[in-house]
Image (cartoon, helix red, strand yellow):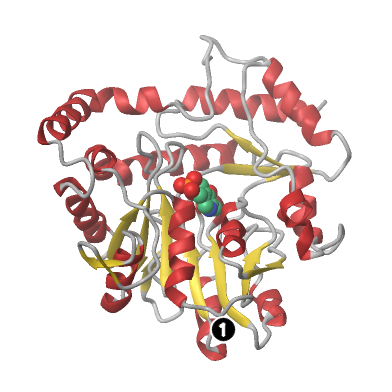
Amino acid sequence: MPLSSPSPLPIQMLDLVAQHAPLQAALEAATHHTLAEAAFIQGPAVAEFAQELSAYLGGTHVIPCANGTDALQLALMSLRLPPGAEVIVPAFTYVATLEAAAVLGLRPVLVDVLPDTFTLDPAAVEAALTPATGAIVVVHLFGQCADLEALRDLADRRGVALIEDNAQALGAQFTASSGATWWAGTVGEVGTTSFFPSKNLGGFGDGGALFTTDAQRAATLRQLANHGQSRKYHHDHIGLNSRLDTLQAALLRVKLPHLPRWTAARQQVAAHYDAALATTPGVQLPARDARSTHVFHQYTIAVADVPGSREALQQYLAARGVPSVVYYPLPVHAQAAYAYLGYRAGQFPVAERLCRTVLSLPIHPTLTSEQVAYVAGVVKEWAHL
Ligand SMILES: *Cc1c(COP(=O)(O)O)cnc(C)c1O
């Protein structure tokens, strides 16, 4: 198929310069204001940003912190689990999900994911529960909610906490069988998110937040993120120094109002990819769970599990100016740091296959329809070789 001109290149995985350009004046004003005010730690913008994000998420308590990994650690700290308690995590995720448990002396217990949505398999979670299980950490991978209803029910039935790692799905919603609509991150005892620059709401450095609907737990989390202090120099808990910088909060306040529009743009790109790639042999498109919206942090396809196939596609794309990234190339149980958990190759067949076959295509709010058509055209061309 001849590719259309004019050239839609260059194409980037994400384009923060283009995303920020229309906001330049507002971002500079917020920066200047923060510098002039000089309240760099816990300045007014931090509480203002938390309030605005809370309003967006239907009124849940929002506790800003230093990054998404700290948010996971703080969430687990708030549960006060005994040393060695088991924490169920998906076998296919970013390492931070289990790192947060391991660093606290808790034991990550890996559970395989579903082959279509790549998220935690509730039946496998149930099978992995033991009397030592303290929490389930669910990851809304790539921007779509895992089966929140099944996992919430299971956690309630078995008396374990549910933590949502919502670093990739801020703004996604899950519709329960009751008809109720839940914001991702507000269903677990604690939800966490990240404002790492590449996330759907990215800052200008590290940042993160915790969500909870429980006022008491919100107060505890707020203390834990600030040296466990209830008031200055009075430390009720062993906490962390994990605060969102005032400057980050001031800049995130500028970006937050645009999140719904950026999400819609990502969804439009995904719909365009879906349509253009619908009948591409050997390419599995992102599965949509009808109960969840998908905010498309990533648009991740999977190719046939044939050695070298994914790498061949990646090279074919690169040679034609299309970047792509493998999230994630190595399953967490194969990471050197987690060898002590004693897992073996073959124990998590879905996660292992995904690590061999997935490929994330460019998706961001300023990707043009010509660029999407071009990327899809190159993928199809490769598939028909
Ligand atoms: C980005 C990410 C994190 C960690 O967030 P940081 O802000 O980088 O610490 C945790 N879990 C998942 C699934 C992520 O994508």
Counting from the top left corner in percent of width and height, residue 375 is at: 60, 26
Does ligand 1 reach within 8 Å of label 1's beta carbon?
Answer: no
Counting from the top left corner in percent of width and height, residue 259 is at: 32, 44
Specify the quadrant of the image occupied by residue 321.
top right
Q: Residue furthest top?
A: 6
| Whether residue 232 is visible | yes
Q: Residue at x 38, y 68 (%)?
A: 186
Counting from the top left corner in percent of width and height, residue 302 is at: 72, 44
Left or right of 302? Residue 270 is left
Specify the quadrant of the image occupied by residue 316.
top right
| Whether residue 296 is visible | no
Q: Residue at x 43, y 41 (%)?
A: 196
Q: Residue at x 49, y 53 (%)?
A: 69
In this view, the residue in front, 312 or 191, is 191
Tell me if residue 10 comes above or below residue 269 in the rendering. above
- The N terminus: image quadrant: top right
- The C terminus: image quadrant: top right
Amino acid type of the residue tagged 1 in the rendering: Leu
Tell me if residue 301 comes above or below residue 174 in the rendering. above
Counting from the top left corner in percent of width and height, residue 110 is at: 70, 66
Which residue is denoted by mark 1 in the rendering?
154
